[in-house]
Image (cartoon, grey):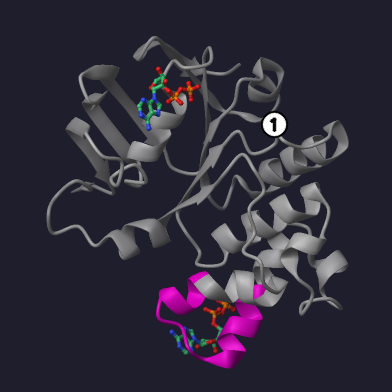
Amino acid sequence: EDIITSKDVHLSYGNVEALHGISLDFEEKELTALIGPSGCGKSTFLRCLNRMNDDIPNIHITGDIKFEGQNIYDSKMDLVELRKEVGMVFQQPSPFPFSVYDNIAYGLRIAGIKDKELIDHRVEESLKQAAIWKETKDNLDRNAQAFSGGQQQRICIARALAVRPKVVLLDEPTSALDPISSSEIEETLLELKHEFTFIMVTHNLQQASRISDYTAFLMNGDLIEYGKTA
Ligand code: ADP
Ligand code: ADP
C-alpha cells in the first residue's frame, strides 16, 4: 500500500529548475532511501512531501503529491495536520534550547494535547522509541542542547515520533554524527520501521544498503533508478 504518491513533480527556484518531473510512490511501513550526488535535488524533493519549502521566495512547484490519497498542495490542506502526519528530522541535531521534556511536549501542545498525563506518557513513549530514555529519564529538565550530538539527534527523533506521525522524513540524519552514534541510530531506525514509514535522504550508499527496503536514485533533478534495495 502506498502512503505517499507523487506524480510529475517539477520544482523551480526562480528560473532554475531543480526537479524535472519526478514520479515516485512510497510504501507504507517501508524505509525508502533517496540517494544521489550532492545537489541532485534529494533534499528539495524530500521537503515537498510535507511542504517544508513552501516559504522559500520564488519557489514554484507543480505536479501531484498525495498523502493517503489527499492532494497535499490543495488550498484546503491543513499544514499543522499534514506535519503531524508527516514529520521531519534534519541533518544537524537541532533540539530547541529548552528542556528535553518541553522539546517533546512542544509538538504535542501544537497538536492540541493539553492533558498532562497524556503528555507525560507520550514523552516517555517517544524517548523510549528513540532509545534515549535511559539517558534522559532522570534529566527531563535538563537543556536538550546540553546532551551529546548523537543524544541530541535522538531527542529530535523522539520529538518527531511523539505526535505519532505515519511518515517521518529524515534528511541525512546521521551525517553530522560520529560513526558509533550513526550506527546506533541506524539500529533504532531498523527497529522502528515496522511502525512508521521512513523516507531518508542519504549520500551514504552503504547506509542505504544496510537499512533501506527501497532505494531511489536521483541525478540532476531526475529519478533515474528505483527499486528494492536488495
Ligand atoms: P541535494 O539534497 O541532492 O544535495 P538540493 O535539493 O539541496 O540537493 O539542491 C538541488 C538544487 O537546488 C541545487 O542546485 C541547489 O543549489 C538548488 N537549491 C537548493 N535550495 C535552494 C534555494 N533555497 N534556493 C535556490 N536554489 C536552491
Ligand atoms: P496508548 O499509548 O496506551 O495507546 P495514548 O497515548 O493514546 O495511550 O493515551 C493515553 C491516555 O490518555 C489514555 O487514557 C487515553 O484515553 C488518554 N487520551 C488519549 N488522547 C487524549 C487526548 N487528546 N486528550 C486527553 N486524553 C487523551
Residue 32 picture location, percent across and down: 51, 30
Which quarter holds ligand 1?
top left
The structure residue drawn at horizontal position 82% and vertical position 75%, both measured from the top left corner, is 137
**Left or right of 32, for residue 92:** right
Frontmost residue, 188 versus 22: 22
Identify the residue position indicated by label 1 in the image.
Answer: 175
Q: Is residue 112 magenta?
A: yes
Residue 197 picture location, percent across and down: 50, 45
Kindly tell me whether residue 189 is visible in this rendering: yes
> Which amino acid, mark 1?
Ser
Q: In the rendered image, which quarter contains the C terminus?
A: top right
**Left or right of 153, for residue 34:** left
Frontmost residue, 87 versus 26: 87
Residue 27 picture location, percent across and down: 42, 36
Q: Is residue 23 magenta?
A: no
Kindly tell me whether residue 124 is visible in this rendering: no
User: What range of the chain is rendered magenta?
Assistant: 107-123
Residue 74 picture location, percent across and down: 14, 50
The structure residue drawn at horizontal position 57% and vertical position 44%, both measured from the top left corner, is 90
Q: Is residue 194 above or below residue 145?
A: above
Residue neighbourhood size for the residue with mark 1, other residues' Cα within 10 Å, grouped as few (<14), some (14–19), many (≥20): some
- Quadrant assignment, res 46: top left
Q: Is residue 142 above or below residue 51?
A: below
